[in-house]
Structures are given as structure tokens and as C-alpha cells.
Image: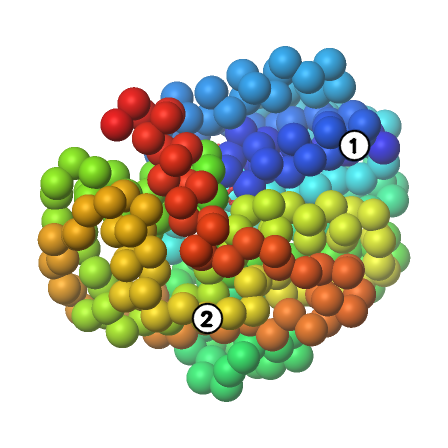
Amino acid sequence: MKILLTGSAGFIGFHTAKALLARGDNVIGLDNFNPYYDPKLKEDRNAQLLKEKNFTLVRGDITDRKTVAKAMRGVDRVCHLAALAGVRYSFEHPEEYIANNIQGFFEVIDEVKKQEIPGLVYASSSSVYGDNTKFPLSEGDRTDSQLSLYGQNKKDNELMAHTYHHLYGFPVTGLRFFTVYGPWGRPDMALFLFTDAILHDRPINVFGQGKMQRDFTFVEDIVAGIVASVDKNYPEEVFNLGCGRKEELMTYIATVEKACGKEAKKNFLPMHPGDVTVTDADISKARKMLGFEPKTMIEQGVPRFVEWYRKYYGV
Ligand SMILES: NC(=O)c1ccc[n+]([C@@H]2O[C@H](COP(=O)([O-])OP(=O)(O)OC[C@H]3O[C@@H](n4cnc5c(N)ncnc54)[C@H](O)[C@@H]3O)[C@@H](O)[C@H]2O)c1
């Protein structure tokens, strides 16, 4: 297939592109290499993709309709992962979130409709569950109370996708990712911050006094779920993609310490208002309909990240 992949220089986009290319798909990557985090990391991921003959990069912005229209021409599927992905940054720069995550999503989905592309898969988030306290979180549970503008953006994307599907009939699948980690991971996320601080003998910030629990999902497992969604191309679905095993934050930190071979100096802090206390995915729907089966637990996945980090940064 020929697939337009937005956010191809991003963490999940890069791994998704590699998997699609490895099985022989043609991938058109679209990314604006924004400076939300070090663009060098994006450039380095992208340089790897450019070595593949079936990969083409469009350097541009999803909020620019002309760019989106040109990149989309003649593709079989659109996989839309580009977004501003940090929860906390959405408190400081709400306007950027509306532009990239709402307007940007609209430009992509409206162009899918216009060009009659036969399938759209897009990234949603576990953040749509907001302050829900019924666990594990299932797709049918309430998603009407988000705790951040980022969570609201993702819920808005799901509603827009539902409406477009209802009106125009093309297949749309939304994927609610649960805390994704792995090699080439994002510098603003916990695993990167912990590893970086521990290896440089700086204290780590432990939010929520270490009482939070997270369903941490290894990036290769997420990619398997994305690729299966692209292939199944269901008329209209939303899936949880998580590991299906929740971990105490302190257990996660102990796993990072073990992989780094050092104990962390810990700076315990209260919860950030945008954070949820627990995420815990019910993945039975994805198991059944996508054949989704997470293979990598934190005991294997965290050391793989630390190994990558040490090699990439020479620490
Ligand atoms: N990583 C996670 O744990 C997680 C969890 C839930 C949902 N998600 C979602 O998954 C998707 C991918 O996340 P990620 O972790 O790979 O983040 P990332 O920031 O590494 O990747 C996003 C990419 O999109 C690009 N981008 C952003 N705005 C753009 C625009 N206007 N035009 C073109 N490109 C643009 C960025 O430059 C970046 O390379 C996002 O939609 C994110 O919200 C991620």
C-alpha cells in the first residue's frame, strides 16, 4: 500500500514507518520537525527512514491544506500521528494545541473526505478517559471529563472522526495509546527524564509522591496495533492500545535504576493538575479484533531504552 504517515519524524511515527517499510509498503512521511523537543532527534530518526527506497519525506505542516492535499494524493491509507503530544505543555501553550491538534486534525480528515481516501487511522490517547475512576478502562467507558486541553483535543478528534464517518462513510479508526516508551523515545517523557537524570547524577522528579500507576506500553507493541488497524480498516472503531498491565510508578523507577546500574536521588512532588492517578487499559477489544498481543513488559522494554540512550548520547 501507499500510506501517508503524519508525524513520521516523531517517536511513534518513526517506528511505525520502519514497520510499514519493512513489509514493503510505500510511506510518505509528513512532519514539520517542530522544536517542542530537540529537533535533532527527529532529524536523526528521519535520516534512518530516508535510507529506505520506499520512503519519501514531505517537510511541512498539517495545518497547511495545500501541503496536506499534495502529500495525500493517490494514497491508499492515511495514518495520522502528528500532534503536540505533551500533556503538561498544553497548560503553557493552549493556542498551539488548538492549532496543531484541532485545526491540524481537521485539515487531515477533511482532505481524506475530499480525496475519498479509503481509510484513516489516527492517534487518540488514554487521556480521553480523564478523571474516570472505573478500572480497567474500556472503550465504552465515559470520556466526558478530560483533565487537560490535550485530553480534550483527543476527545474532540474522536468526535470529529465519528461525525465525518457518519456523514461521508469512509473508514476511521482511533487508537487510544497508553504511555508509550522505547528506544528513540521522547525527551519530555518519564523514562527519558529518569534515565537522563540518573546517568548524570541529577535527582529525578517523582510526581504524585510516587503513588501514580501507569499502563506502560512498549513502542513495538503499539506499532503492531497501528499496523493491524491499517490492515483491518474497520468502518468505525476506537481501540485501547495498552500493555494491559498497570505498574506502580516506584516499580517503574526501580526498573530504570536497575537498567542504569544506579539508584536515583528522588525529589517527591505533588500531582500535576493534568495528571491522572491511574491508567489501566482493558485491551480485550483490540485482542479480539486486531489480534493485538503485547509482548514486551517493562522488565525487557526499559533496558532496551536505556541501552539505546547510552549508545545515542554516548553516556
Ligand atoms: N507517546 C505516547 O505515550 C502517546 C500516548 C498517547 C497518545 N500519543 C499520540 O501519538 C501520536 C504520536 O506521539 P509521539 O509520542 O510519537 O510524539 P512526537 O512528538 O514524538 O511525534 C509527533 C510528531 O508530529 C510532528 N508534528 C506535530 N505537529 C505537526 C504539524 N502541525 N505538522 C506536521 N508535523 C507535526 C512533530 O514534529 C513530531 O515529529 C501523537 O498524536 C500523540 O498525541 C502518544
Residue 23, numbered circle: 1
Residue 203 or 174: which is nearer the viewer? Answer: 203
**What x and y, as percent, mark residue 150?**
44, 57
- The amino acid on which the numbered mark 2 sits, given as a three-letter code, is Lys
Above or below residue 23? Residue 94 is: below
**First of labels 1, 2 by sequence position:** 1
Q: Quadrant of residue 148?
A: bottom left
Q: Which residue is mark 2?
A: 246
- Taking 214 as reference, is 126 left or right? right
Q: Element under label 1?
A: loop
**What x and y, as percent, mark residue 163?**
74, 62
- The amino acid on which the numbered mark 1 sits, given as a three-letter code, is Arg
Q: How far apart are labels 1 and 2 at the CA level? A: 31 Å
**What x and y, as percent, mark residue 1?**
85, 33
Above or below residue 290? Residue 96 is: above
Above or below residue 59? Residue 168 is: below
Q: Element under label 2?
A: strand
Above or below residue 100? Residue 166 is: below
